[in-house]
Amino acid sequence: MRELPRLTVAVLASALLLAGCQPSGKESLVRGDAALRAGQTEDAIRWLERAAQLLPTEAEAWNRLGLAYHHGGRPADAEKAYQRALRFNRDLFDVHFNLGELHLEQGRAREAEAAYRTFISGSQANAQSAVAWRGLGMAFQAQRQHPNAELALVNATKLDPADADAWNALGASRFHLRRHRDAHAAFVQAAKLDPNLAAAHLNLAVVLQQHLSNPREALVHYQTFVSLSPNAPEAASARAAIRDLSIRLGIAMPSPSPAPVPATSAPSPVLLDRKSTRLNSSHANISY
């Protein structure tokens, strides 16, 4: 038999060596998960795409890849990955949670509700997830099902009394149920837990001005809201409310800006003024 040239043998040996050094599918999954938790989204996508390629029927690989796409601002790819995960394991309930988060962000409230319900009913531990109950409550709110929203959000605040966003959302549901003093109490708790939660200050201002006849305290919360979120969509009407209330209360105002904003009615309660950070909260580290 003819002997291979030495250069060819060397190239083949190098290729075999490199192939042997490539991480396995499970190793790629572990590395991708670590990158995702470290906020290294592009690295996570690269490792998890490799993991899904090498472990094409591994539901957790597709779930993690969906999370990476979700964090990376690729919602369509995230949904495809989540659905692929469910194709291989319908009982991987974390996928349903992640789909709930994705659908809620996309305004697909009915689908978000179904996903959160599936997650919560999946196990006793899932039923104790405050963030899942909060998500379900907000899905109900988006469908104007405020009694159901209140029930879900009460569960969320019982399971995690320190969740300012859940208290703020609970206050919004009670506002829409015309229980304005209960709404006020919930908004107060939200602002107490997180003084920088601008939405809670706006909601306090609205309920105090419109329903509890306390314009002076409302003015303080409008001012706090504007200082925290000067570029928010509601900031213009909040500034108009500040001018109107200052005039009513006889409080001196700074000179008007060159292009003052026309006076408008006070804004309605809002839920969250910051991006949700609950995306990966229900998952344990992967180890093999």
Image: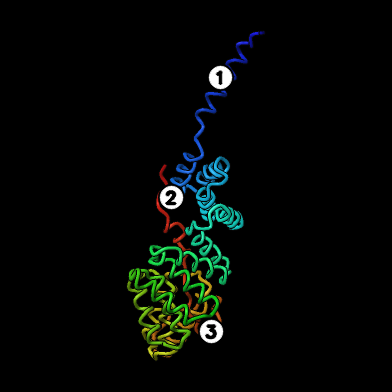
| Sequence-first disc among 3 and 2 | 2
Q: Which is nearer the eye, 261 or 20?
A: 20
Badge 1: residue crowd in 10 Å (few <14, some 14–19, many ≥20): few
**Which residue appears at 52% of the width and 42% of the height?**
47
CA distance separating discs 1 and 2: 36 Å
Q: Is residue 62 left or right of residue 182?
A: right
Q: Which is nearer the eye, 153 or 183?
A: 153
- Marks 1 and 3 in Cβ contact (< 8 Å): no
Disc 3 marks a residue whose amino acid type is Ala
Badge 3: residue crowd in 10 Å (few <14, some 14–19, many ≥20): some
- Marks 3 and 2 in Cβ contact (< 8 Å): no
Disc 1 marks a residue whose amino acid type is Ala
| Residue that label 1 marks | 13
Dot label at residue 263: 3
The kind of secondary structure element at disc 3 is: loop
From this view, report whether residue 279 is shown above or below residue 205.
above
CA distance separating discs 1 and 3: 77 Å
From this view, report whether residue 165 is shown above or below residue 40.
below
Residue 286 location (% of width, % of height): 42, 47
The kind of secondary structure element at disc 2 is: helix
Disc 2 marks a residue whose amino acid type is Arg
Residue 56 location (% of width, % of height): 57, 44
Residue 39 location (% of width, % of height): 45, 50
From this view, report whether residue 105 is shown above or below residue 264.
above
**Which residue appears at 35% of the width and 69% of the height?**
159
Dot label at residue 37: 2
**Which residue appears at 49% of the width and 81% of the height?**
146
| Sequence-first disc among 1 and 3 | 1
**Considering the image in quadrants, where does the C terminus appear?**
top left
In which image quadrant can residue 168 be found?
A: bottom left
